[in-house]
Amino acid sequence: MKVLGTLVVLLFGGLLIYGTLDFPSWGDPAAPASTHVSPRYIERTLEETSVPNIVTAVLADYRGYDTMFETIVIFTAGIACLFLLRVIKREEAEARMYRHIPTGITLRVKQRARLPESMEEFERIDLMWVPYDLIVKTGCRLIIPFSQLFALYVIAHGHHSPGGGFQGGVILGASIALYAISTNLRSGLAWFGEKAAVLLCGLGVFIYASTGALCMLLGAGYLDYGALSTLFGVDPVTARSHGILIVEIGVGISVMAVMVLLYYNIVSAGRQDEGL
Amino acid sequence: MINWLSAILVIGGLIFFFGGSIGIIRFPDFYSRLHPAGKLDTAGQLFTMSGIALYIAQDASLHTFLTAAKIVLIVIFIYITSPTATHAIIDAGVRAGLKPWTKEGQS
């Protein structure tokens, strides 16, 4: 069986390499890719979409379907990881640790033990607790607002400079993960909960798809942003640029939520009670 | 004149980077390797970036001034993040129980 598998892999690998022989050489000006679509994108992007960044225009406008399904792939991956990793059944851990805040005494409370009525003086800590590091905490607190601001800039400025929804979404998700790292998982969940993450994950895809559907309702093709001109009250070319921005915001929301979901599920082995 | 100054600053920064790269390879253990990785990179980028900022800002206009200000922001953010990251890594090493290298122990 192993020999057969190796043979199949080698055969298909050989076929694929044989197939690349027919490719045009790299950067060939006579290749089909550089004779039909590329010159059109390079020459007409600015007058058709008023977006200076050709990459963004191709990504979100000319090939809008491609990017929409890319976003759906990310959404599906996030949901699949949630189903694979998340432990739905709540198995109580054998013990919990509480710290008495005024004195710093740590208590280990066994499962199903009776807790005092007022827990205000106690904070729950992880079983594998390490003291919160002041330097890491302060550094993260300094960095998180700026990284979120930068992420919003990357999403909103994708028209004019490198960037866009995917990159900005990852930076946003990283800032939330950074907060969870610098404190603990429960603080991260209290700030950006799992339900919010799942909802936003779907909301991003919804924004993208419904923008396309809105264009259809206004009488143009799916994802033909020029039709949004009546809605925004601008000429169709500027409306394309606005449509790209809306779509990028949807992508950013979806990517951020998926990143946060992946982080929560991986660090806590799907239980989402204790972790980094 | 300013061209020369910025060239000297950039070359000085590259010397720091070079020393850092050698240190990462040549030092004996985890903690001592993080020393050049954390310190010399931070110092090197300070000199390189200030050299570049000086070079850009020599023809004074609002545009070049803004670009130089952005470079200074990069320096500030690396000064916050790089030592924090090095500290967190070393802290994790100490908590995981890694013993520092000594000449007698040879481990």
Image (cartoon, coloured by chain):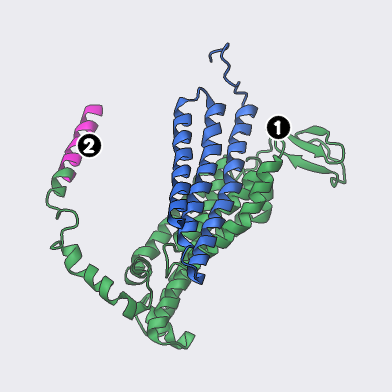
Give the residue at the far front of this rendering: B1
- Residue behind mark 1: A94
- Residue A64 location (% of width, % of height): 36, 69
Kind of residue indicated by mark 1: Glu
Percent of width and height locating residue B39: 56, 38
Q: Does residue A133 appear left or right of residue A33 in this picture?
A: right
The answer to whether A80 appears left or right of A98 in the picture is left
- In terms of secondary structure, where does tag 1 sit? loop
Q: Quadrant of residue A122?
A: top right
Name the residue at the top extreme.
B104
Secondary structure mostly seen in magenta is helix
- Tell me what residue is drawn at x 50 percent, y 55 percent: A170
Q: Is B100 one of the magenta-colored residues?
A: no
**Label 2: few (<14), some (14–19) or many (≥20) C-alpha neighbours in 10 Å:** few
Dot placed on the residue nearer the N-terminal end, 1 or 2: 2
The disc label shown at residue A238, or none: none
Residue A205 in sight here = no
Give the left or right position of residue B69, taking residue A221 as reference: right
Give the magenta-colored segment's residue range.
Answer: A1-16
- Spatial CA distance of label 1 from label 2 is 47 Å
Residue at the image position 48 percent from the left and 35 percent from the top: B20
Secondary element type, mark 2: helix
